[in-house]
Image (spheres, coloured by chain):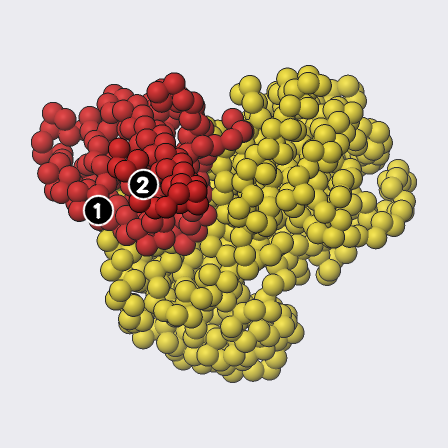
Amino acid sequence: MAGKVDLKVVLLGKEYGGKTSLVERYIHGKFNAQAPYQSTIGAAFGAKKVTVNGESVTLGIWDTAGSERYESMSRIYYRGAKSAIVCFDLTDPSSFERAKFWVNELKQTEEDCVIYLCGTKYDLVEDNKKARKVDASSAKEYADEISAKYVETSAKTGYNIDYLFMMIAEDFVNVTRNKVQANKDEDSSVALRLEQPPMNREKCKC
Amino acid sequence: MATKEKVKTDDEELSVQAPDLSYDLLEEEDSEEFESVEAPALADEDEDRSFLPVTKKKGRESSSSPRIAQRRKKLDKGGGGGAGLEGGGSDVSLHEDIAHLTTDEDHFRNEDGLRSDMLISLGGPNQSIGASLLSTMTVGEKPKLPDADPETAELARRARMNSTSKDEREFEDEDVHSSSWINHHKHIFIVSTSGKPIYSRYGKEEQLVSLFGIMQALVSFVADDKDVLRCISAQNLKIVFLQKPLVVFVAVSRSKLSENQLKLQLSYAYYQIISVLTYTQIKQIFERSPGFDLRYLLQGSEKFIDNILNITDSDPCYLLNGIRCLSMSPSLRQTITSTILQYRAKEVLFALLIAEDRLITFIKPKDHNLHPIDIHLIFNLVMASTSFKSAESWTPICLPKFNDSGFLHAYVSYLPENSPACLLLFSTDKEKFFELQQCKERIVDKLSKLGLLEQISNSVDTSDYNIDHLQAPEIRHFLYRSRKSYSITSPTMPHLYSSEEDRLRLFDYFMTMNQRLHSHAWATKILYHIGSKEALLGWRTSNFDLYVVFDPLISKAQAILLGNKLIRWINKEEDRLIITSTPTF
Ligand SMILES: Nc1nc2c(ncn2[C@@H]2O[C@H](COP(=O)(O)OP(=O)(O)OP(=O)(O)O)[C@@H](O)[C@H]2O)c(=O)[nH]1
Ligand SMILES: [Mg+2]
């Protein structure tokens, strides 16, 4: 599993929120409802390679512990992350509050990190409206407010899991490509500037 | 493993001529209670930081003072009963009121519902304390709890309420008024010096608030008189207090463990908490807000405290201050060790390879040591959580004996191919995950090239051994601890001891023998005990401690003969049974 990681993804959210299950489902394709809950200690690392438009991207995924005692140390794990999946449990309103805490933390310290707001355990609320404690519209509203994408997932059924990570990888590739493109453009404009007077700059607008 | 120890070569042959040994042979009746004596080898010594005034332990001398009589008088006046103070002589049964007040809700009533023979041992020479302690207790008020810091209290309350579920704790929901709760063999409570509940081994802390308050009141009451409350004994019940800065640990025990052994067990709980939070953090928190609810930060870690208490209750290694080693071929162990040494990244401070609670090998820098307690905490971390099995982890952990003020960062990963062996690499730098990950990859590659991964798994499966080939069926079991390397080995427990009850009896025997062999007061080197179910030999030299369990019908001379035979075999097999030297870099 060692090797170069192209994209650092971090999962944050309240304990028992379903982060480990989400990653397990994504990396190993499994979910064990029988296994007793085991809180994560510190953080677990996993890597997965995906292909986006023929380009291979290695995701380095940090599944952090939700326990409060790690809060002061959480920077170790999210520092330099390009994407963050901020999870909350659709059946637990307090986990949504906790998600807001993490969003604020990220906004303050990791400006460049792209945030994905993720409502977990969708299978529990799918057929049971009463179990749902955070409604989709207010979650979506909040996501818009912080300009994040909003997804609801289920580790149990696999619903939206691949979709979520694929979206993350694609966004990354598109952003980096744009950036590379932007850099190239900048470079060439600089080069142009050096050689020619700055009037001839239509090129950039295309 | 940890501290350096001068190795003197003793005469490591037991003499068969019993008369020569008679001066230090102690024979005991099965029923006889082993008396509690001074500190065992590993009594906790870190009392220096206590915020309470620490007075030297003088148990016996202090109570022989003439003021005892005066105190007794006061007691008599106060309640019609009285307390026999340690060493004070006569046992006067304690008054009912006092009994009630100790627990408020009769939690610790003895079977017959009466509390008699209560002994209170204090750390210091204070004389009037017993009387005033007991007289306040008779007031019959619930001690007032200090006002909680409303903010943190609220935080913790919310955190708890909102927790949809936590790691399951077996006894968390036990009714604290049920008889099963009262009758637990050993209760452990942790309370802050300001009276805030931190942990109860059984039942929810919320339901025990008044009990916690009383514990705190007892401790601070004694502290007011510049004394230290160490132990209260009532018939077959011992209540032992371990006072650490800002936190008090209390054991309420029906077991045979001595006060010091119970203290050591409490120390394990203390170190476990430090391991999760560091001493510095706890200190900062409590200095900032004394009413802080520490459970808020310990949430999710209770299982580590539960687990360390359960292990220290059943595995003798923990209280005997030694590390159980995986028995394996010495050349295999050697190759693994040198591979780890060879591929060690410069960021690695310690590296350990373990299989559950058995150490395969470890390496350390020349100028640092790993204390057995720290290794036990590492075992506990890995054993109490299966979450390491599914992925590589990077986790902060404080090893209190190494440095209790900061975290080390541990890279934890099981070897591939579903190996039962778990590799832990420790670094002081929190940024070095990928370096350690690579280091592990290199070690694993090499081991796999040498074909050792499978051999390691096999060794774990076959590490249990018996001593049938010694052709000494009278030897049922033994436990050997090297005093040089702190390594422990013992064979598989025989079928005779398959019941919990039998195993616990052996556990108690080992503990009592250890207490005897290592107490300053007794300085016994050899101990022989004939019980109704087994005979036991305890033997201490400057190189090892050996505890042997024999058939009860064996003669003393025969036991000595077999003890010698056993130790010869162990010496011959030492490289396989234990880790004899610690490779350093
Ligand atoms: N029904 C259902 N249960 C889920 C789902 N995801 C997680 N769970 C359950 O929720 C509990 C917590 O899941 P984890 O993935 O361990 O939670 P976590 O966020 O990693 O928790 P920490 O490591 O403590 O931060 C477990 O008992 C899971 O089985 C889901 O999609 N559906
Ligand atoms: Mg987790």
For badge 1, the amino acid type reads Ile
* Chain letter for the part of the structure drawn in yellow: B
Mark 2 or mark 1, whichever is nearer to me: 2
Query: Which residue in the protein does label 2 denote?
Result: A200
Q: Quadrant of the C terminus of chain B?
A: top right
What residue is drawn where x is 39% and y is 70%?
B288
The answer to whether B539 appears left or right of B454 in the picture is right
**From where the camera sits, is residue B303 visible?**
no
Residue B537 in percent (x, y) is at 74, 40
Query: Which residue in the protein does label 1 denote?
Result: A146
Chain containing the residue with disc 2:
A
What residue is drawn where x is 79% and y is 49%?
B525
Do the CB atoms of the residues marked 2 and 1 lie less than 8 Å apart?
Answer: no
Label 1: how many Cα within 10 Å (few below 14, some 14–19, many 20+): some
Counting every numbered tag in the picture gives 2
User: Splitting the image into 4 quarters, where does residue B17 fall?
Assistant: top right
Chain containing the residue with disc 1:
A
What residue is drawn where x is 68% and y is 24%?
B446
Foreground pick, A173 / B190: A173
Q: Quadrant of the N terminus of chain B?
A: top right
For badge 2, the amino acid type reads Asn
Residue B36 in percent (x, y) is at 62, 57
* Chain letter for the part of the structure drawn in red: A
Q: Classify A91 as above or below B175.
A: above
Mark before the other along the chain sequence, 2 or 1: 1
